[in-house]
Image: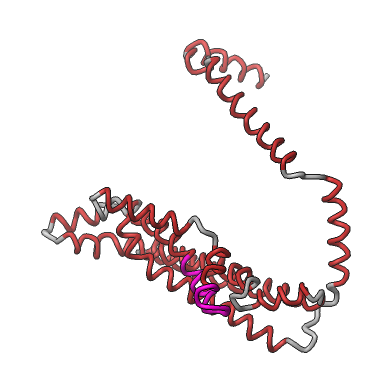
Amino acid sequence: MRQNSISENRAAMAARYPEQFRKPVAARLKVGAIVFTFVALFLFGVWRLDVSLSRIISGLWQLGWFVTLMFPPSPEGHFQTYLVATFETLGIAFLGTGLAAVLALPFGFLAARNVIPVWIFRLLTRRFLDSVRSVDTLIWALIWISVVGLGPFAGVLAVATSDFGAFGKLFSEALETADNKAREGIRSTGGSYLAEVRFGLIPQVVPVIAAQVLYYFESNTRSATIIGIVGAGGLGLHLSEQIRTLEWQQVSFIILMILVVVAIIDWISSRLRLAIIGSRAIS
């Protein structure tokens, strides 16, 4: 009974608004062409990259064998060394994230449409940020290692350079989405342009920027481990060494340390982000 009522209502609406229910043939062909293109690209990628189900199954058996060799996890007398490397990894993530945020803040203002009215400056700034952001953190680590040598300093520079481009884009978007009513109020009282930005714009975006920085610090804790594999210090360096020497029990112990550290950082940063969002809602 209910189904019949729905069908009758649909028929009545179709009769009343036929142009809304009559889908053009060209639109249907366009949707079909898009779906066909994506399916064809997917199948071509599977063929071109030699994706094989049998290789996946055999690889899972090999992975299972590696997992059995990882138990029980053990530092094999290197716990203090791994603990120092853990704090080194946190230091790389913290310093790299902080340095990137400080350097990217002025570029975020230069790339914001509601701060810089001259389009050529915004265009050049955004293209510069895009070019920096397009290079992965691991590539920046390899570049900085060749410049300053092995060690955590190269890791800090790699994280800072990679996040600089991302922060510049995120900060500019946060500025552009801010409410202009506060700026208009300051302008109506005779305030200068700098006063509009300082008192009408910055207080709105500071909580957003702080939440973004906290999230990237959490993410960079993992990134600092990855770049350590190529020689940028931290736990990743020890992880790479133990994998090369087939010390699987130590490998599993280092992985557990990474998981614990990431979980703690995730919990702390989540609490801080909620506190920042809550304070922003109250204000």
User: What range of the chain is rendered magenta?
Assistant: 145-161
Residue at x 49%, y 72% (from the top left corner)? 157
What residue sits 66% from the left and 76% below the top?
Answer: 237
Which color scheme did the rendering employ for the protein? secondary structure
Instruction: Looking at this view, name the residue that lies furthest to the top.
Output: 15
Q: Which residue is drawn at 68% across and 71% down?
A: 259
Residue 55, given in percent of the width and then of the height, sits at 84, 50
* Residue 244 shown left or right of residue 265 in the figure: right
Q: Residue 17, percent across and down?
A: 47, 14
Residue 47 shown left or right of residue 271 in the figure: right
> Relative to 72, is 130 above or below?
above
Residue 166 location (% of width, % of height) = 45, 59
118 or 181: nearer the viewer: 118
Quadrant into which the C terminus falls: bottom left
| Residue 150 on the magenta segment | yes
Camera-side residue of 143 and 281 = 143
- Quarter occupied by residue 251: bottom right
- Relative image position of residue 1 (x, y in whole percent): 68, 19
186 is higher (above) or lower (below) than 265:
above
In the image, what residue occupies the spot 70% across and 76% down?
257
Closest to the observer, 14 or 146:
146
Residue 224 sits inside the magenta stretch: no
Residue 45 position by quadrant: top right
Main SS category, magenta section: helix
- Residue 202 higher or lower than 258, as above or below: above
